[in-house]
Amino acid sequence: MAEFRCAFFILLGGPGLITSLTGRSRFIRPTPIWKVPLYAAGNARLFPAEGEFGIVRKDKWDSDDCTVLGVVGEQYTPLQNREAFTFFDPIVGEGAAIYHTAGVLGAGERIWILAKLPDSITVKNGDITDKFLLLSNSHDGESAVQVKFTPIRVVCENTLTMALGKGKTIRVAHTKNVQQRLRDAQRLLGIIRDEFAEIEKDFNKMAQVQMDDDQLGVYFGLVFPDPADPDDRRAAERAGKHRSWAGYFFSNGRRDREYGVEGTLWAAYNGVTEYIDHRKTQQTNERRLRSLWFGNGCSIKARACRVAREKMQAWRN
């Protein structure tokens, strides 16, 4: 089995740079992805696994460290990394965003890029949040090209992960038609701008909600709920620990008093994100990043945002 590592690349540039993001090295050439038949072992023989195929890297095929990135069906067509993000190139070409940072997860089953938009979100007295989008392409056969909103609060580097439309991500259809791609890019850019405008409004509304103890308990209870099984003591203890630590960061948020957001729903939301992003764990950097952007950590932060958006009107002072 190949060693699981994570490679990062600093881009800070325009369209066309993503064609090099297919391996562990900064200078590696694009590596095609193949779909190959799978075989099942039985009675000392190999039998074709009917209707199932494995996704592998072409440069690793027939080598001892070839890793199956995902198992797919007969209708699946791999989307090459050099093609996956071309839909976003026109947006970068217009100066509406730049490719900022990129990386590879695992053995190459997921490629991701952070794209930074030129302006920022301001909450109350200068609490700045930069606008980022997380683009990802997966070869595990389970997810398409996705775009997630990942604004990053400057003062504490909290990644305020959320999905489009308060619950969805943008899924991008792949097309080789240049004119269609340009039309899709303009449509996508309009969605991005509209969504970030709504996000800025909501962040400022959160900052106007002063939390009392009861509201704080309700909020953290919805973000970190008790287990469905009341007899699961370990799960209940974990949920209580999570709520306690989120409360600690709510009370001790970096420069919250200076920005005039101390004790607000905005501070509570950032208490959750700061705890999830910066707590000490036994995870490797690879597993931690996977969780924060695509796994359980991402889900918790998205839930924290959703609950805050749902409650801010009812709790508005």
Image (cartoon, rainbow, N blue to C red):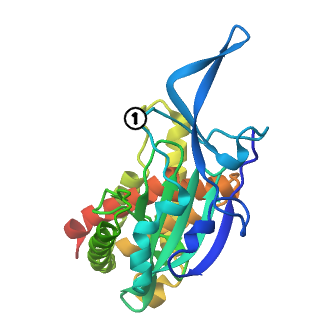
Whether residue 262 is visible to the viewer of this picture, yes or no, is: no
The percent position of residue 199, horizontal first and vertical second, equals: 31, 74
Residue with the most extreme left position = 314
The percent position of residue 52, horizontal first and vertical second, equals: 51, 28
Q: Quadrant of the C terminus?
A: bottom left
- What residue would you read off at disc 1? 228
Q: Quadrant of the N terminus?
A: top right
Looking at the image, which residue is at 20% across and 66% down?
Answer: 314
Q: Nearer the viewer, residue 82 or 280?
A: 82
235 relative to 166, above or below:
above
230 relative to 199, above or below:
above
Q: In the shown orientation, is residue 255 left or right of residue 163? A: right
Residue with the most extreme top position = 43
Whether residue 259 is visible to the viewer of this picture, yes or no, is: yes
Residue with the most extreme right position = 64
Looking at the image, which residue is at 70% across and 13% down?
Answer: 45
Determine which quarter of the picture holds residue 150: bottom left
Q: Disc 1 residue type?
A: Ala
Q: Nearer the viewer, residue 207 or 231?
A: 207
Mark 1 secondary-structure assignment: loop
Looking at the image, which residue is at 60% across and 52% down?
Answer: 32
The percent position of residue 280, horizontal first and vertical second, equals: 67, 60
Q: Residues within 10 Å of mark 1 (few under 14, many from 20)?
A: few
